[in-house]
Amino acid sequence: MKERIYNFNAGPAALPLPVLEEIQGEFLNFKGSGMSITEVSHRSKWFDEVMVDATERVRRLLRLDEGFHVLFLQGGASLQFCMIPMNLLLEGQSADYVNTGTWATKAIKEAKAQGKTVKVAASSEDKNFSYIPRNIHFSPDAAYTHITSNNTIKGTQWASFPDTGGVPLICDMSSDIMSRPFDVSPFGLIYAGAQKNLGPAGATLVIIRQDMVDRVPQHLPTLLKYTTFLESNSMFNTPPCFAIYTLQLVLKWLEETIGGLEKMEEINREKASLLYRVIDESGFYKGTAEKESRSVMNVTFRLPSEDLEKQFVQQALEHGLGGLKGHRSVGGCRASIYNATGLDGIKALVDFMEEFARKNG
Ligand SMILES: *Cc1c(COP(=O)(O)O)cnc(C)c1O
């Protein structure tokens, strides 16, 4: 490739070009330090400013009040599958989980592996996770209810969050955090691996409410306790400095260039509707998710045959459109269209899809 392509990878995924350029511009000498941001101490004023700014931007974008804490951890979203029950599901308690796909299944498995009591309050496994369950009966005495806001692999998303009757919601927002505004008040904990919508791999954003912090048992291993990171401003040990720095720039772009989450949602909805329209009107492509449950971030679809799918992915790449292969566990095609994917990329993909359907339909 001589030039940058339109990148539809699911994660790690596209980053806003102005962010990459800003990183490039200050890479050798970060803010007059005479060093790269990857070379300065995490205790230096340079990195401290990055950390403070990143935290403040998360707070502003999601409108967090004093009751919420912002942490940057490592281990990906996958380590949260383990830390959440370890820290927040105590002896004698039970938690509700909604199983909407691969990642939720893993979260349930990690809780059970610790011998914790888990109730699957609802599941869409009966129809290959192609929808978000409705009219769920949640347990009123659960320690928490765990959901996955966007199902990256199956291409489904909660259009609105369920009412759990006051039981704290815990949510894996790895693939749609910061894609739309929402009311944080029902959430006890929100987590997201950075590599989809926030930055490069290596940092995990955790937003935790004080009443969840109060549950954390003393006896847990130091690095697996939320309180360790809360008490040290996420710097008990060396944090993933470069990932946090990039995330800070992505949030700055989101606030200052895009104009915040309301605007971001508007753009994201337009992007998704352009793609779903081609799928629905083509008679060639077939969406895999139930319409009411469709994701605005991961558009999953099939072609009439696996052979055509292979050709589609290959020819798309020749047209500068990359990353359109579905997850290895499900096959098919997937366009991941996170915040950083602009309308220009969507229009290029729409044109290609229409032409491919004309030629092969
Ligand atoms: C990618 C993804 C994960 C896994 O994230 P890691 O950071 O690789 O552990 C978990 N949940 C969802 C919804 C994801 O999209």
Image (cartoon, helix red, strand yellow):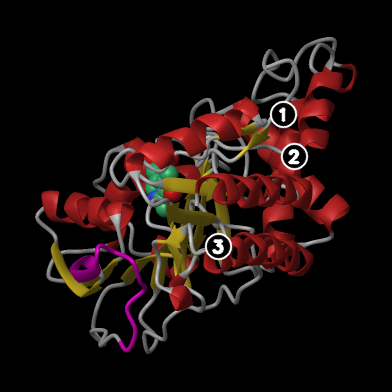
Q: Quadrant of ligand 1?
A: top left
Along the viewing direction, whichever of 237 and 310 lies nearer the viewer: 310
SS at circle 2: loop
Residue name at image x 63 percent, y 52 percent: 354
Q: Is residue 130 magenta?
A: yes
- Whole-percent x, y for residue 349 in the image: 66, 46
Along the viewing direction, whichever of 237 and 349 lies nearer the viewer: 349
Mark 1 highlights which residue? 47
From mark 3 to mark 1, how far is it between C-alphas?
50 Å
Can residue 230 be seen from the camera position used here? no
Q: Is mark 3 within 8 Å of ligand 1?
A: no
SS at circle 3: helix
Residue type for callout 3: Ser
Mark 2 highlights which residue? 16
- Per the rendered image, the range of residues in magenta is 125-135
SS at circle 1: helix
Along the viewing direction, whichever of 241 and 293 lies nearer the viewer: 293
Report how many numbered discs are placed on residues in the image.
3
* Label 1 vs label 2, nearer the camera: 2
Residue type for callout 1: Phe
Residue name at image x 44 percent, y 55 percent: 301
Mark 3 highlights which residue? 282
Q: Earlier in the sequence, mark 2 or mark 3?
A: 2
In this rendering, position of residue 201 left or right of residue 52: left
Q: Earlier in the sequence, mark 3 or mark 1?
A: 1
Residue type for callout 2: Pro
Which image quadrant for residue 37? top right
Where is 23 relative to 296, above or below? above
In this rendering, position of residue 91 left or right of residue 360: left
